[in-house]
Image: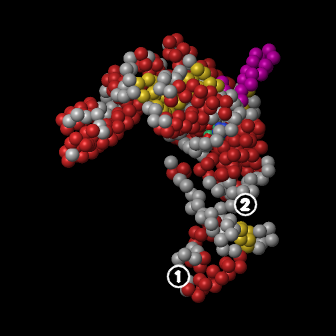
Amino acid sequence: MTDESDNSPPESDPSTAETSNDADGQLDVETDTGTSTGPSDLDDVILDNLDAGSDDPSDEASRGLFDDLLEGEPIFENKEVLRPSYTPHKLPHREEQINNMATILVTALRGDTPSNILIYGKTGTGKTASAKFVSEELETTSQKYEVPCEVEYINCEVTDTQYRVLAQLANKFIDKNVKLIDDRIAELEDIRSRARENTAAALEETAFDSLDDIEAEIESLEADKAEFEEVPMTGWPTDRVYSSFFDAVDYHERVVVIMLDEIDKLVEKSGDDTLYNLSRMNSELENSRVSIMGISNDLKFTDFLDPRVKSSLGEEEIVFPPYDANQLRDILQARSDVAFKSDALTEDVIPLCAAFAAQEHGDARRALDLLRTAGELAERDQTDNVLEDHVRQAQEKIELDRVVEVVRTLPTQSKIVLFAIILLEKNGVHNINTGEVFNIYKNLCEEIDADILTQRRVTDLISELDMLGIVNAVVVSKGRYGRTKEISLSVPTEETEAVLLSDSRLGDIDDVQPFVQARFDN
Ligand code: ADP
Ligand code: MG
């Protein structure tokens, strides 16, 4: 999280003067309010300070080493606004989806159970941001009208087993219940102490007939509280975790919307038991009702669901289509107004970020990443403006980061195959074929004591690298010699090699020349 730390300067007081250098090099002081210090007053202030001596900490004369540096940040006003962790309160081009969600969920505010909702769309189409926005609105409104409606958000990429999902939910509701009980006990204790002083008057405004009744109620609440045992993060049988959650939710009347973001990850990792259990809860709950909102990047996961779960989860479906370049422009414009100093962006920056991201299946996350990275590159260049070229560099940098991440997480065998291809390219071999890769691959495996796969498997691994966009493999016909694959690298050689060599096993290979030589020997 260290790179998330806020390096921006402290918010400047809007009533103080903003200084900037004009084109003509003159120091120009703009004032936001009529009462601030104007240019002529400034001289007076400086003179006053000189009179007062130089050790007064509140004035210009005490400016230290960092003051100028802090102010000399011409690009960003608030970089956080461009980070994925920021939840915007305006979501252009998602009005329809947000309204659909609200129309379904408003049922909860009427005390009924909303239909389950399945939301899907590619990454970066605003699903999480929209869902969080709607859930905040729902909770605010429920508080306003004092209807018991609660939303629980779970990211299933992190919480990816049935045990963890149920434990997390159980503990959330146990906490809420305990808090509710504590509040109620405090209230009762208050009534009790007033009743001890003046029984009749104090009891009159309550539902209690006697002090004993209050005592009994407090005792019963204490007993309820003792029943709620926090679920440990591992160790209990799943049945027990489930019934803890069940009892905690059903402790009093309420409608609960459970948002399961990245729900496909949960199903992929742990099957559909969680969804099965959650979706049949309502038939057994006495006081409360549960409604599920599943969010997924990929609709295919529903093929792996029990048909009952599938139809229950998909009672309502909301699709988030990819953004087009124009929509991405609007999104970027809204954010950049807050994120950047005015005039920091040159005209072409936003359209270009939008165009690049539109090619990436309309991914708003990519668009924002590009804009932020372009700003950071401009900052590094110590220029006052973000230029089109910064966006192009940002695109390259992000693309490279992606490649590095993909290569870094490849299985060892694929890394060895890729390394063989790199060695061939580095030695000037063009039109590399599978046989050549295989020969080098075999030698590399021997060198690091790895299993040697068959040439057929290696051909498959090359196809996988092709699908990941790391190599390009085209089938060419060699006339009467049949067909072969011609392989070339689609990623930068040096950087990719560096990533491979950072792997502990491949890092052991020091002298690679003999392996390349070997291709002539076989
Ligand atoms: P998803 O969950 O579909 O992968 P997110 O909701 O996480 O996508 O959106 C990715 C990024 O783009 C987030 O930073 C989000 O705030 C931003 N974003 C997406 N759609 C919009 C929109 N319509 N307006 C403003 N920002 C958006
Ligand atoms: Mg998301």
Is 148 or 161 nearer to us in this picture? 148
Q: Position of residue 43 (x, y in %)?
A: 68, 81
Cβ at disc 2 under 8 Å from ligand 1: no
**Numbered disc in front, either 1 or 2:** 1
Q: Is residue 238 visible in this depiction of the protein?
A: no
- The residue stretch that appears in magenta: 461-485
Figure label count? 2
Q: 10 Å neighbourhood of mark 2: few (<14), some, or many (≥20)?
A: some
323 in the magenta segment:
no
Find numbered disc 2 in the image and state the secondary structure of the residue it sits on. Answer: loop
Residue at 56 percent across and 15 percent down: it is: 303
Is 469 or 489 nearer to us in this picture? 469
Q: Is residue 290 left or right of residue 14?
A: left
Residue 55, label in figure = 1
Q: Amino acid at mark 1?
A: Asp
* 55 shown above or below 350: below
482 in the magenta segment:
yes
Q: Is residue 72 visible in this depiction of the protein?
A: yes
Q: Between marks 1 and 2, how big is the CA–CA gap?
A: 34 Å
Residue at 53 percent across and 21 percent down: it is: 115
Q: Position of residue 167 (x, y in %)?
A: 38, 30
Residue at 37 percent across and 20 percent down: it is: 286
Q: Amino acid at mark 2?
A: Thr
Which quadrant of the frame does ligand 1 lie within?
top right
Residue 119, by quadrant, is top right
Find numbered disc 1 in the image and state the secondary structure of the residue it sits on. Answer: loop
Going from the N terminus, do you reach mark 1 or mark 2 first?
1
Read off the residue under disc 2: 383
Q: 10 Å neighbourhood of mark 1: few (<14), some, or many (≥20)?
A: few
* 112 shown above or below 345: above
